Image (cartoon, rainbow, N blue to C red):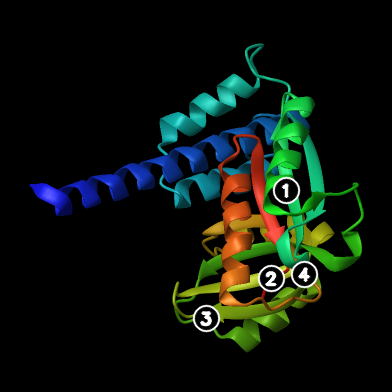
Amino acid sequence: MGRAYEYRKARKFKRWGMMAKTFTKIGKDIALAVKSGGPDPTTNGRLRAIIQNARAANMPKENVDRAIKRAVSKEQEDFKEITYEGYGPHGIAIVIETATDNINRTVANLRSYFTKSGGALGTSGMLDFMFDRKSVFRIPAGTIDLDELELEMIDFGADEISLDEEAEQIVIYGEFTAFGAIQKHLEEKGYEIKQAEFERIPNDTKELTEEEAADLEKLLERIEEDEDVLNVFHNMR
């Protein structure tokens, strides 16, 4: 079968690895959502959104059900949500959201990644002024009129709506505190929510050369592969 077979096999294993990482992340999201709002998705909007995200990621329903059952059992690790901030190579600001059952392990790993890349892990809150935390929803574009949707959603906290032509989806941005109101309205109107999450949007971005961007990508890849990391945000253009 030769080299082509080995290449396809390597790509398949990488895809499986990414899928496993995604499922692990969703499992932690479920644990945190159940801890804060209970195991019933009909009364827990955050959990309902995570289940929708799981469906979009092709996570099997039995995996989701198992994660919910585990979250209410005594077997579940006590995860803590902690955000870390720092500067990567070439002065790029990086914010990392984690869910960890061992803070010492997490901070030691992250500090090591930053140090080896020529960056530095900073103090909590140092980059708050550089990012806006937003509620972000994605729905199928279909035949929806963007202007009409914007007028419809503005009363529920949405402040920007755009079309992702490649994914054939409409992206709705809203204030962090408007997540529940936007989610409820979309559900009541029968819109299919493909994804719902929080994102940190940089207020200003920094452009790097191709070589500089490659340096940063190496650090981001190390961070994203860490089992305690949920999300990574940065201000590279």
State the separation of the CA atoms marked 2 and 1: 16 Å
Mark 1 vs mark 3: give the one in front.
1
Q: Secondary structure at mark 1?
A: helix
Residue of label 3: 144
- Residue identified by numbered label 1: 114
Instruction: Name the residue rendered at 89%, 59% in the picture.
Output: 128
For badge 2, the amino acid type reads Met
Q: Horizontally, is 2 left or right of 74 in the view?
A: left
State whether residue 77 is above or below residue 1. Answer: above
- Pick the front one: 224 or 208: 208
Q: CA distance from mark 2 to mark 4?
A: 9 Å
On residue 197, the disc is none
Which label is found at residue 202?
A: 4
Mark toward the start of the polypeptide (1 vs 4): 1
Q: Mark 2 — residue? A: 236
Circle 3 packing at 10 Å, graded few (<14), some (14-19), many (20+), is: few
Residue 201 in which image quadrant: bottom right
- Mark 3 vs mark 4, foreground winner is 4
**Cα separation between marks 1 and 3:** 44 Å
